[in-house]
Structure formats: C-alpha cells, structure tokens
Amino acid sequence: QVQLVESGGGLVQPGGSLRLSCAASGTIFRTYVMGWNRQAPGKQPEAVAQITSGGRTNYAESVRGRFTISRDNAKVTVYLQMNSLKPEDTAVYHCFYRDSLNHDYRGQGAQVTVSS
C-alpha cells in the first residue's frame, strides 16, 4: 500500500503561481512514476504532468512552459510548480503514484482556483 499526502493548493489571481507537493509513503518501489492529473467541474480528467524515478518528465500541451514537475527521490516527494496560472487551470489536482507492477494510487486532491 502507498499513501499520498498532497499540499499547496489554494486561490490565486490570474498570472500568479502556486506549488503543489505530494509525499508518498508505504511500500515504495525503486522504479515508479508520480505525477498529477486534474479535473475541472463538468470536464473529463486530464493528465497534467508526470516524472519517473529516473527523472524523465512529460507535460500536457496546455501547461508546457508554465508548469514544472520535479522530485526528491530520497523523500519520495514530487512538486508541481505552476506559474502564469490561468482561470482554465482551475481544477482539483490529484497526485498519483504508479509502480513497475502497475499498482496505482491517487491522493485526496488539492483544489486550485485561479480567479480575480
């Protein structure tokens, strides 16, 4: 079992920044992928960004150049630095962890609201 604890959501004005954190604990494999999905009201879930334990990253086109995902393997923690936020970034952001056996876990979600 893996537990994910997210932090860092909130309300920010357009153009502002927020940083999300997600700490994993429990049975952690040496090889894994962690990242973030988001879901806005009335919309389908969307993959935002992910990073492997080896450091490979992938971003949705809608956030590329504005969001940066990073990780601290020793702490099994990933961070999502979100800059130049737009109202359309408003969503609940869920952290996920997936290991090499495709065990998949999701965090409780962090609300991000971008509004003036």
Image (cartoon, rainbow, N blue to C red):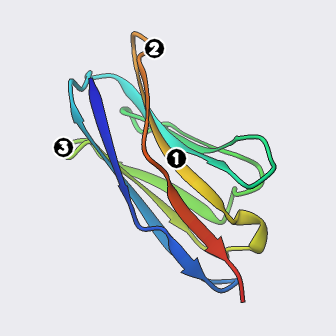
The reply to whether dot 3 and dot 2 touch (C-beta < 8 Å) is no
Q: Nearer the viewer, mark 3 or mark 1?
A: 1
Q: Quadrant of the C terminus?
A: bottom right
Indicate left or right for 59 with 54 as reference.
right
Name the residue located 39 percent from the left edge and 14 percent from the top edge.
100
Residue kind at label 1, given as amino acid type: His
Q: Circle 3 sits in a helix, a strand or a loop, which is it?
A: loop
The reply to whether dot 3 and dot 1 touch (C-beta < 8 Å) is no
Q: CA distance from mark 3 to mark 1?
A: 21 Å
Name the residue located 80 percent from the left edge and 47 percent from the top edge.
43
Q: Circle 1 sits in a helix, a strand or a loop, which is it?
A: strand
Point out residue 115 in the picture as x, y percentages from the top left corner.
71, 82
Indicate left or right for 115 with 78 as reference.
right
Judge by depth and name the residue closer to the eye, 6 or 21: 6
Q: Which residue is mark 1?
A: 94
Residue kind at label 3, given as amino acid type: Ala
Of labels 3 and 2, earlier in sequence is 3
Q: Is residue 17 visible?
A: no
Q: Nearer the viewer, mark 3 or mark 2?
A: 2
Of labels 2 and 1, earlier in sequence is 1
Q: Is residue 34 visible?
A: yes
Indicate left or right for 102 with 44 as reference.
left
Q: Which mark is residue 47?
A: none
Point out residue 87 in the picture as x, y percentages from the top left corner.
76, 73
Point out residue 18 in the picture as x, y percentages from the top left corner.
51, 73
Q: Which mark is residue 102?
A: 2
Residue kind at label 2, given as amino acid type: Asn
Q: How many residues crowd around disc 1 within 10 Å: few (fewer than 14), some, or many (20 or more)?
A: many
